[in-house]
Image (cartoon, rainbow, N blue to C red):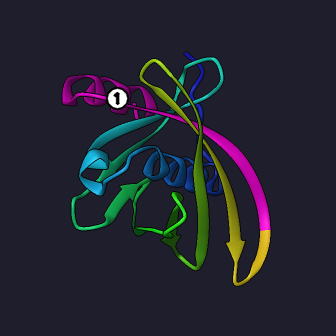
Amino acid sequence: MKKLRPNWKILFVILFLWIVACVESSEWEGTWVEEDSAGEPVALLYFNPDGSFYASGLTCQYSDDGDGAYILHCNGFKEHCARVARQGDRITLECRSYRGSEPQSSARVIIRRVQETEARRIRSELDP
C-alpha cells in the first residue's frame, strides 16, 4: 500500500469535519481515521471529552461555533468545519482554514470512527 502523508491543511479540515458531524462532543470522543477518496487511511485522530484532540503529534482544541459547525484551533491555525454528507459510517466535512481573519484554503475531509484493533493496524501502516 502506498504510504500517504497528510498535509496540515487536510489534517485540520478532517478534524473540523469530524467535530461537525456529531451533535455532542461526547459523540466525537474516541479514535477516528481520515481517509482519502479511495478509502485509504491518511491519518488517525484522537478526540478527548475535554475538548482536546490529538493528530500527527499535535494536541489541539475544538469547540462548537453555535451555528452547527465546529472550530478547531491548532498552532495558530483555525479551521471552521461543517458536515456536508454521511454515507454509511463515513462522514464528509467541508472545512475552511484561517490564519487570523483571512481565509487560507478549503477542503473536504472524509472520516470514520474506528475501534482500537483497527486503529493499531492503521497506525502500523502509516508509521511502519
Q: Residue at x 53, y 58 (%)?
A: 69
Q: In the picture, residue 6 is in which quadrant? A: top right
Q: Residue furthest front?
A: 67
Q: Residue at x 53, y 76 (%)?
A: 75
Q: The C terminus is located in which quarter?
A: top left
How many circles with numbers are drawn on the protein?
1
Residue at far bottom of view: 100
Judged left or right of residue 101, residue 64 is: left
Q: Amino acid at mark 1?
A: Ser
Q: Closer to the camera, 3 or 9?
A: 9
Residue 4: give x, y in percent of width and height.
59, 32
Going 32% across and 66% down the picture, which residue do you hit? 52
**Residue 1 on image: x %, y %:** 54, 15
Q: Where residue 114 sits: x, y (%)? A: 31, 29
Q: Is residue 98 above or below residue 4?
A: below
Is 94 contained in the magenta span?
no
**Residue 89's image quarter?**
top left
Residue, disc 1? 124
Q: Is residue 112 magenta?
A: yes
Q: Residues within 10 Å of mark 1 (few under 14, many from 20)?
A: few
Q: Is the residue 57 above or below the residue 119 in the image?
A: below
- Is residue 14 found left or right of 88 in the rendered image? right
Q: Position of residue 107 (x, y in %)?
A: 72, 47
Part of the protein shown in magenta: 104-128
Relative horizontal placement of residue 98, taking residue 30 as reference (left or right): right
Tell me the SS state at disc 1.
helix
